[in-house]
Amino acid sequence: MRKNRPMASAMLLVLLAIVLGGCARQKEEPREPKGYQVYYINKEETAVVKEAYAPAAENGQELLEEFILCLQEDSVDGELKSAIPDNVFLLNYTLENGQLSLSFAQPYLEMSKPYEILCRSAVVRTLCQIPEVEYVSFLVGDKPLLDSNETPIGPLNEESFVENAGNEINTYTMTTLQLYFANEKGDRLVGERVEVHYSSNMSVEKLVVEQLIKGPITEKAYPAIPPETKIVSVSTKDGICYVNLDKGFLGQGYDVLEMVPVYSIVNSLTELPGISKVQILINGETNITYQESIRFETIFERNLDMIEES
């Protein structure tokens, strides 16, 4: 029997390591965390930081419960703050048809707006990793969380918080954009005001183009730019915004007039202060004829005639 004790002790140590690991950070591969991550807030309350995490749970409901507990705890070394602060109580939650609803107590509304956005981002990004969770909705009591325009924020997923592809999350800010999409006939533009939370290391010009490619959120508007379009670069100089796209923009997109995708970009960007004109490039080239009729050597200005009268 003595011969079995070392093995039993070793197994006990392994089990203890798994149990005590909890929400501790995994440090074996700090360069590129794999698997799940838990998102925290830094001590300065200015940024969201992710840490690799190996959950003990396996199925969806148990995984959800485990992640919610993690979101209420600081990192093990105390260097990072929990995404759900101590004074913000999670009253209950329900998961139905892929939509997770989180109901918080009234103190949730006492958080400053920038800090609340960071916390909300951390919660959504953590919980949307669970296969059964497609969207997360926030409630205060039984009422939906409202934005600065007193409009319900609605269901969120990881794409609701825009950031530069491939980069770590930095600080977030919020802005309201005036965007233009295709109308139902595809021959004019309709306006749509959207509130977007985005990484502060991204230019607002690029944010506008990304949102146009992503498409509208209301039923009265329709996408104008082919969804396979990729952004090469967006920059502004002397009041001219240079939008460099890949060849996806030239592909067969939606059933709209050729002017609609072009002025979807132009009219949306010229809503921004400091931008009065737009030039569109394809992989850095302007010697392009779009849809056999529009020359991209042209520097475009806002065209109000393209906007459908409401």
Image: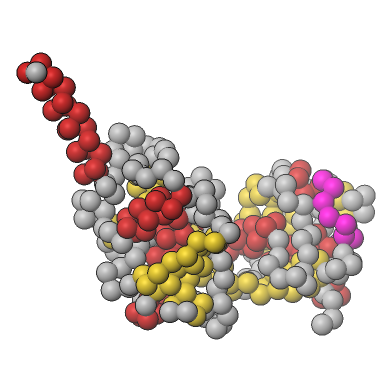
Front-lying residue, 177 or 288 = 177
In the depicted structure, whether residue 179 falls above or below residue 170 = below
- The magenta stretch spans residue 253: yes
Q: Nearer the viewer, residue 189 or 287?
A: 189
Name, please, the residue furthest toward the right: 292
Q: Residue furthest front?
A: 1
Q: Is residue 286 above or below residue 154?
A: above
Residue 95 location (% of width, % of height):
50, 61
Q: Please indicate, yes or no, whether residue 81 appears anywhere in the rendered image.
A: yes
In the rendered view of the protein, which quadrant contains the C terminus?
bottom right
248 horizontally vs 123: left or right: right
Q: Which quadrant of the rendered structure holds the N terminus?
A: top left
**In front of the other: 244 or 72:** 72
Left or right position of 275 against 44? right
Q: Quadrant of residue 217?
A: bottom right
Within the image, what quadrant is residue 120 found in?
bottom left
Q: Residue at 13% across / 28% down in the picture?
A: 9
Segment colored magenta: 251-259
